[in-house]
Amino acid sequence: MIESLVAGFSIIMHWEPLLAIVAGSVVGLVIGTIPGLTSTMAVALMLPLTYDLEFVTAIMLLVGAYKGGIFGGSITAILLNTPGTPASFCTVLDGYSLTKQGKGVKALKMAKYSSVIADVFSDIVLIAIAAPLAAIALKFGPPEIAMLILFSLTVVAGVAGKSMIKGLIAGGAGLLLACVGLDPIFAVRRFSFDVVHLDGGISLIPLLIGLFALSEVIFQLGRKSRTEADQFTIKHSPLPEDNRVSWLEFKQSFRTITRGSIIGTAIGIIPGIGVGIASFLSYARAKAASKNPDEFGKGSLEGIAASESGNSAVVGATFIPLLTIGIPGDIITAVMMGAFLIQGFTPGPLLFLNHATLIYAIFIGFFICDIVYFVIGTLFMKYAAYLSKVPRKYLFPIVMIFCVVGSYAIQQSLFDIGTMVVFGILGFIMTKFKFATAPLLIAFILGPIGETALRQSLLMSGGSLNIFFTRPIACAFLIVTVFSLIGIIRGIIKKSKVTCD
Amino acid sequence: MVFMKKAPAVFVILTLSIFFLFGSTQSADAAWPEKPIKVYITFPAGGSTDIAARSLGPGLEKALGQQVVFINKPGGTGTVAFSILAGEKPDGYTLTVGVNSAIIWNPIVRKIPYKPLADFTPIICFGTAPTGISVRSDAPYQTWQAFVDYAKKNPGKIKYGTTGAVSIFTAGMKYASKELGLKMIHIPYRGSMPAYTSLLGGHVEAVVSDSKFSEYVKAGKLTLLAAFTKERIPDYPDTPTLIELGINLHNNVGMYSLFGPAGMDPAIVKKLEDAVISSFDTKSFKKMAKSFMFETYEIRNKELVAKFEQEWKKNEKTLMDLGMAKKAATPPK
Amino acid sequence: MQPLNKERIIAASVLISVLIVLFYIIPTYIETSEEYHATGLSPAFFPNIATIFIGALAVLFLSLTFIKRWAHFFNSEGESWLSPTEEMKAGLSCAIIVGYLLALKYVGYLIATPPVILGLFFLQGERNIVKSIIITLVVTIGIYFLFQNLLNVQFPQGKLFK
């Protein structure tokens, strides 16, 4: 492993990858900071830019955008009470309260420290675990993959937004939509409706841009300007202690940061879950374990530390299933998988076998990203407020054009723009009726992988379900799935009892 | 401002009218190509078709003097791109690089909204990458005969993976099973990498797929049992072809060709044929050819059209014999 | 109307869609035949399972709305949504976007984009014509160059001009 690290180091220490890291981080920060634009969008829209780049440069550009986007979202969350990405929903709670008290910079700094520490933690885990895991990953045949996806989908179900039933319905819809195209086992047309463009299935990126970005744009285009949204002045307290994080304050939050890092990493490893849930769980656990739970929501630094460490630790970890088994850890890694494939590299255990040096170069790049956005983040925070001053009435029409052109650019297809618009409208309607949209997307991504694996397994076993019990890894995942289902059901029963009292 | 936008259109109309007035097709072609050429690629970026197609780029641009823009239009194993091509103008500015299977194989199995032998001008077939059957190098059968014997002694236990549910790879192995009376389980995969991954992980015993086996054979992890080609693969002189082994089927559809919509001007077709052949000498093509063990062909338009007619009939019979198609799902013309 | 009844209608609509999918769309649009036997699972298997799953959830949801104990779940206000006028504005913007798509197909990017941007600005309340036009032109041309030169994307040219 050491030689690979050294070899990887020499690959990444060139101006192209390094420039890509900086450029990606800046673009990510900018896009993340603008309310309504998410880090997912940042990565999806930058994907076409990577076609002509070298592999490592391309991936670093996207990783920079990913990490920058998450942090950018935190900046708007804290300063403007608007989460820039789903990852920063929890940061808003305490961040904005602190800003109102004039302590915005303190909040930002705490966010930055927690994020970087958690990021480095998960990157270390990534490097440590990835290679050994890749060796085991070859043992993951169709039955194991099928059970893993089953487990992931179960956990996703368990945290599917406010209304779990509606979230599950959205997930089911995602599974159904994923069936459009050719059947993976018999190459038979499903739901093609005689439209030739659907023979290849619904394109992921236009669906993603539509569901997450365009739906938000439509919403914002409808809203009349409300006075607070247009109010840009941010109070800055002149007292020095309000503008930095003291060592004592940092020490108090250290346990929270550690806990958040672990939670984030653990969640990132399981395919399908992703940043929003990680930050939420970290926040919830931190509140439960804190000495001052009532502070949470009113301006608790611990709250910020919890949320930020949770959402940053996920990033490195989501690459683990992608690079070792070839299954994306979340929506953004699914987009990244596209980047890998375009470069001609199929993520999975064979990638480690054949191109270990490139992978290690990317790992080192992750660390460099962390350093870069630590530095840039500080500079950026000063100017961040100006960015969000772009008047809404100009911003969202322009974002709409980006959505349209971005979806078109992937395959130069007007049909893709149509797909994007359809899902934009669908996303808008879903949000109106309080259906969470993320489960739809996760099911859309993981569903086909799971279905193919399941059917291949049944072919292998001649139709018998035994194969999932006789193979140790598959059986293990099955058992874990059952436990997690039990846990979820207990959680629902508890929730219903508690609220009703 | 709208008027200014119409100006280029007016100019083009004027130019064309002048050419028509002079009534000489020769001078119109001498001018072709006058603007960049769009080439659709039927598979996603990064795949072998994509790389093979793009490797022609520099050579084409040099020969034709215009920019060549490659656009990926994946889907339906090539059928989406061809459906789009069928509706384009045969002016030589919109072309497609694809695998012949979208013309002489898939339409037999599945109804496709174009007429494979009538809606296109097959300009030139420029080559193919070899395909074969591989097993793990630590398996107890290291030759084709040993594998067949093992399969006969253990009916229903050998699992083989192929790329694609109704592809030529699947047909090949099914044909072999039928001829030799073997009972094996077929596992279709989406793409060759998942298939090879499964093979290396021990989840299937054999894989019939594209040339990606070579890096694993070189690394000593896989053994190539037989080549699914017409003649032995130059890089693997000791590996017999299935034909030599008595299985009279080879991969006749995995070849890359350049297509245009039907009704293209023969002069333009000839220019393109020559341009592609001249690209064989470029660095980018040679690099691709070496890494893919590419076998270069120069099957020009006239020959290619006749070949397609022949192969269509042959494939129709094969697929019907194997029960993979009842009759041609799509009428060829 | 009462939030509870609204939720019931939503659940009922989901249920009806499920039935349509299950009994019409799946049989019509998935080519199946008896050859697709149990081991590989028929192509319609997964779609059917997913649809039945959604249907079961809809039924569950509907039943829960009738249980008094769970009523508070459905009456919660949650985040603020748009007022009816705002929704109309959103709908109008949607119509403009769909129109944009059609326009792109027939007249191409350079002609379709400026009126759309101007229209949306106007809808958003911008009345300063000069400012609007300047921003529109900058954005249209800026995006054009960004994608055309950086990414080699050929923008739609418009069917009318071919």
Image (cartoon, coloured by chain):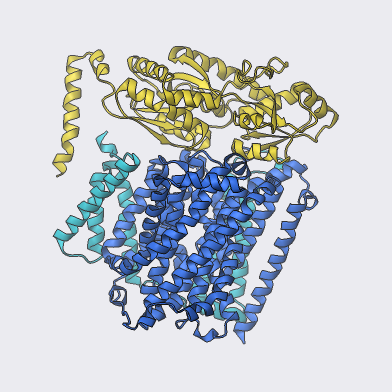
Chain colours: A blue, B yellow, C cyan
Q: Residue at 69% of width from left, 54% of height from top?
A: A147
Q: Tell me: A385 left or right of B188.
A: left
**B39, B235: nearer the viewer:** B235
Using the image, determine if residue B131 lies above or below residue A386.
above
Q: Tell me: C118 left or right of B246.
A: left
Q: Residue at 63% of width from left, 30% of height from top?
A: B213
Using the image, determine if residue A394 lies above or below residue A6.
below
Total marks shown come to 0
**A385, A381: nearer the viewer:** A381
**In the orientation shown, which residue stands out farthest toward the right?**
B153
Residue B283 in percent (x, y) is at 43, 24
Residue A311 in percent (x, y) is at 51, 66
**A221, A426: nearer the viewer:** A221
Q: Tell me: A376 left or right of A89.
A: left
Residue A192 in percent (x, y) is at 52, 42
> Residue B234: in sight, yes or no?
yes
Q: Tell me: B137 left or right of B73.
A: right
Using the image, determine if residue B281 lies above or below residue A200.
above
Q: Residue at 53% of width from left, 66% of height from top?
A: A118
